[in-house]
Image (cartoon, helix red, strand yellow):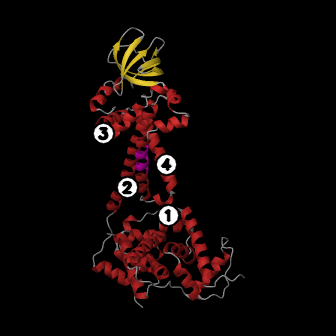
């Protein structure tokens, strides 16, 4: 019978085989943990932007657009970022699974934990305003994402449901304004009983959103007038018009 | 440079101590090989059904890999689990390389009786097997199982590994191992019936 132990030892010596250095394994483990951390970080950015978009949703207009709150939630949910969050959670699962002890945990638990970590990270990032800036960068530079933003804004183009958005083109009197909506259609808006939110006062070129009632072709009675997505979004309507994205 | 120990000193060292010694002194590795050689060789033969020569080649390849990767050994694991893991991976590699080779599962007669007895007394197995079945039939029944099921059955019932050890060897969660084992047992029972191993007592 062959002495396998001796033969193996001889082969190790003859072929000058050496143990792979410890730092190689240390490096490999570190890379895995770094990749895991990066996946969580990018997942946090995705969830941070999703949180930002959800905080910007005007929940009080839900009944104008959907029959139920769930229906409205499905309409405004930031799916794009949710897909990113899930994608990065799957990456983090793959990297974690390959760590030394990663195999001991069930797939569902790892994915769930990754999502939770990303949501917590996203909430923390949301406080730093980073997601808001990144969302703006995406909206301004990524054509596909810009299209998604357009879809969100289009929700306000539902005059039959009592929602309208556009730019004041002329102020006829204190109670009547002329408005060009996102599609370029002219409207006469009665604002006599309207509440102006966000310290707004009527002025030409002001971009606004209106809640009210359509009274016929080109006639709208406003109950409430809101600024168009706050100060930072000023000029977006014009840019969109220039790009022809609302037509 | 570490001072070389005597043969007796090496033999009394724990696996983990021998790993550390082997990194500095290749001769210490001889005692680790010696310690695991019979177990791993049996495991290879049970898993692959290879002829002795082929099994010894696989064994040598496994120990070369063990030696190369000594620095990656995680002391929170049992050394035996780590060696079995390397052996398992090497056999999977061999299996992929050599798919056309269909060896038979290698079981001694005592192995066959062991397996039957263990399955009989396993609380999850409700149907029992008579003791009189032939080793050949058990071999064929095991042989017919997919590798993943054969693997867990062999580790649990031949190598006497517990769920956590099997989990460490196969790098799967212990819960998955339990599920895999249950499926393997019911598959084995089904196949065993075809080989008439399931006459009720």
Residue sitting at x 37%, y 38%? A148
**Foreground residue, A18 or B170?**
B170
Q: Chain letter for mark 2, please.
A: A
Q: Which residue is mark 4?
A: A113
Q: Residues within 10 Å of mark 4 (few under 14, many from 20)?
A: some
x and y percentages locating residue A35 in the rendered image: 36, 52
Residue A32's disc number: 2
Q: CA distance from mark 2 to mark 4?
A: 17 Å
Q: CA distance from mark 3 to mark 1?
A: 43 Å
Q: Are marks 3 and 1 on the same chain?
A: no
**Foreground residue, A155 or A79?**
A155
Q: Is there CB contact under 8 Å for labels 2 and 3?
A: no
Q: CA distance from mark 4 to mark 3?
A: 33 Å
Q: Is residue B158 magenta?
A: no
* Image: magenta residue range: A82-89
Disc 4, SS: helix
Q: Are marks 1 and 4 on the same chain?
A: no
x and y percentages locating residue A108 in the rendered image: 51, 54
Most extreme residue toward the top is A173
The relative height of residue A216 versus residue B61 in the rendered view (above or below) is above
Residue A143's disc number: 3
* Residue A25 is at least partly visible in this image: yes
């Amino acid at each position: 019978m062959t002495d396998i132990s001796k033969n193996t030892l001889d082969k190790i010596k003859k072929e000058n085989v050496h143990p792979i250095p410890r730092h190689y394994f240390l490096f490999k483990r570190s890379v895995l943990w770094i990749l895991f951390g990066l996946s969580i970080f990018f997942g946090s950015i995705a969830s941070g932007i999703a949180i930002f978009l959800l905080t910007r949703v005007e929940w009080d207009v839900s009944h104008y657009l959907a029959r139920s709150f769930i229906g409205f939630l499905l309409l405004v949910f930031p799916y794009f970022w949710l897909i990113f969050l899930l994608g990065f959670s799957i990456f983090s699962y793959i990297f974690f699974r390959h760590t030394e002890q990663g195999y001991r945990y069930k797939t569902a638990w790892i994915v769930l934990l990754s999502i939770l970590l990303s949501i917590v990270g996203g909430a923390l990032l949301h406080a730093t305003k980073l997601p808001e800036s990144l969302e703006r960068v995406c909206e301004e530079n990524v054509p596909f994402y810009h299209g998604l933003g357009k879809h969100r804004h289009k929700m306000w183009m539902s005059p039959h449901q009592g929602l309208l958005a556009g730019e004041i083109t002329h102020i006829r009197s204190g109670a009547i304004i002329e408005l060009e909506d996102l599609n370029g259609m002219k409207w006469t808006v009665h604002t006599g009983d309207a509440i102006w939110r966000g310290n707004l006062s009527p002025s030409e070129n002001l971009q606004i959103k209106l809640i009210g009632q359509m009274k016929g072709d080109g006639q709208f009675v406003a109950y409430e007038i809101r600024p168009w997505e706050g100060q930072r979004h000023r000029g977006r309507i014009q840019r969109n018009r220039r790009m022809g994205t609302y037509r | 440079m570490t001072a070389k120990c005597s043969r007796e000193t090496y033999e009394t060292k724990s696996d983990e101590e021998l790993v550390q010694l082997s990194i500095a002194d290749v001769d210490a590795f001889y005692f680790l090989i010696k310690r695991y050689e019979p177990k791993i060789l049996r495991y290879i033969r049970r898993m692959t059904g290879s002829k002795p020569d082929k099994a010894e080649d696989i064994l040598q390849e496994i120990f070369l890999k063990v030696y190369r990767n000594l620095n990656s050994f995680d002391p929170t694991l049992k050394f035996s689990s780590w060696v079995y893991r390397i052996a398992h991976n090497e056999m999977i590699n061999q299996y992929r390389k050599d798919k056309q080779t269909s060896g038979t599962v290698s079981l001694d007669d005592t192995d066959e009786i062991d397996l039957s007895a263990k399955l009989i007394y396993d609380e999850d197995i409700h149907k029992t097997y008579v003791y009189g079945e032939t080793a050949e039939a058990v071999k064929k029944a095991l042989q017919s199982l997919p590798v993943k099921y054969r693997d867990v059955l062999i580790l649990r019932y031949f190598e006497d590994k517990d769920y956590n050890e099997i989990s460490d060897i196969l790098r799967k969660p212990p819960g998955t191992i339990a599920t895999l084992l249950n499926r393997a047992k019911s598959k084995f029972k089904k196949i065993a019936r075809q080989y008439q191993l399931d006459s009720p007592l």
